[in-house]
Image: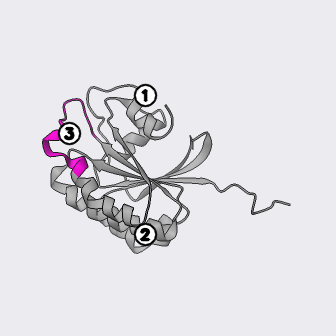
């Protein structure tokens, strides 16, 4: 007989962000589909809905949910939160650090998702990936990372919620692997 109290819960990792933030490319690095530094980002098709897979992360079998970032899908997730945001262990939010024009939209999306995850997965660990921190990108030019954090940190601090953040780029895959505990 299996004792339910001692049974280890499976890990559920979600990766969420606006469309074209690089979520699927990040997962392709982690699963070995992209295994070397590239001269240019790969051409990818957008994720439609949620792409679910099981991979080995944290030395354990992990359910990975890659959320497509197009507006129609974002609306679906937020209108059916229990279906998507229940029992999350790790919540990776990807910010395209080069997308100046949609920064506020990304902030608003994060805040909405954050509230739903707090409701349905209050123990989820929050990790920000400030992605596309590419070699030719000057992070000080527009300081999008600072502007994003300025808009969300107060909410996190008010509820005393810890978070972790990483700067990542496809041009240095070690940055991605480090953010997922693989380096």
- For image coordinates 26% across by 58% down, the residue present is 106
Tell me the element at label 2.
helix
Q: Nearer the viewer, mark 3 or mark 1?
A: 3
Q: Which mark is residue 116?
A: 2
- For image coordinates 81% across by 59% down, the residue present is 2
Residue 174 covered by magenta stretch: no
Residue 36 visible in the current orientation: yes
Asked if residue 64 is positioned above or below residue 133 in the image, the reply reads below
Asked if residue 2 is positioned above or below residue 139 in the image, the reply reads below
- For image coordinates 21% across by 53% down, the residue present is 147
Q: Is residue 86 left or right of residue 179?
A: right
Q: Earlier in the sequence, mark 3 or mark 1?
A: 1
Asked if residue 64 is positioned above or below residue 137 in the image, the reply reads below
The region drawn magenta spans 132-146
Residue assigned mark 1: 35
- Residue 144 vs residue 112, the one in the foreground: 144
Q: Is residue 135 left or right of residue 155?
A: left
Asked if residue 6 is positioned above or below residue 80 in the image, the reply reads above
Q: Earlier in the sequence, mark 2 or mark 1?
A: 1
Mark pair 3, 1: CA separation: 26 Å
Residue 133 covered by magenta stretch: yes
Specify few, some or many for label 1: CA neighbours under 10 Å numbering under 14, 14-19, or 20 or more.
Answer: few
Residue 53 drawn at (x, y percent): 53, 49
Q: Which mark is residue 139?
A: 3
Tell me the element at label 1.
loop
Is disc 3 in contact with disc 1, using a CB cutoff of under 8 Å? no
Q: Which mark is residue 11?
A: none
């Amino acid at each position: 007989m299996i004792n339910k109290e001692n049974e280890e819960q499976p890990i559920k990792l979600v990766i969420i962000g606006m469309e074209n933030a690089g979520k699927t490319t990040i997962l392709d690095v982690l699963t070995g589909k992209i295994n070397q530094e590239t001269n240019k980002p790969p051409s990818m098709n957008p994720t439609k809905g949620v792409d679910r897979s099981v991979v080995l992360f944290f030395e354990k079998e992990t359910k990975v949910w890659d959320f497509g970032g197009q507006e129609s899908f974002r609306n679906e997730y937020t209108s059916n939160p229990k279906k998507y945001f229940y029992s999350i262990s790790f919540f990776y939010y990807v910010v395209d650090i080069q997308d100046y024009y949609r920064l506020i939209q990304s902030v608003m999306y994060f805040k909405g998702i954050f509230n739903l995850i707090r409701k349905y997965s209050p123990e989820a660990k929050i990790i920000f990936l400030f992605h596309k921190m590419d070699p030719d990108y000057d992070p000080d030019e527009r300081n999008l990372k600072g502007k994003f954090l300025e808009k969300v940190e107060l909410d996190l601090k008010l509820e005393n919620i810890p978070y972790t953040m990483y700067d990542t780029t496809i041009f240095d895959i070690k940055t991605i692997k480090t953010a997922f505990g693989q380096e």
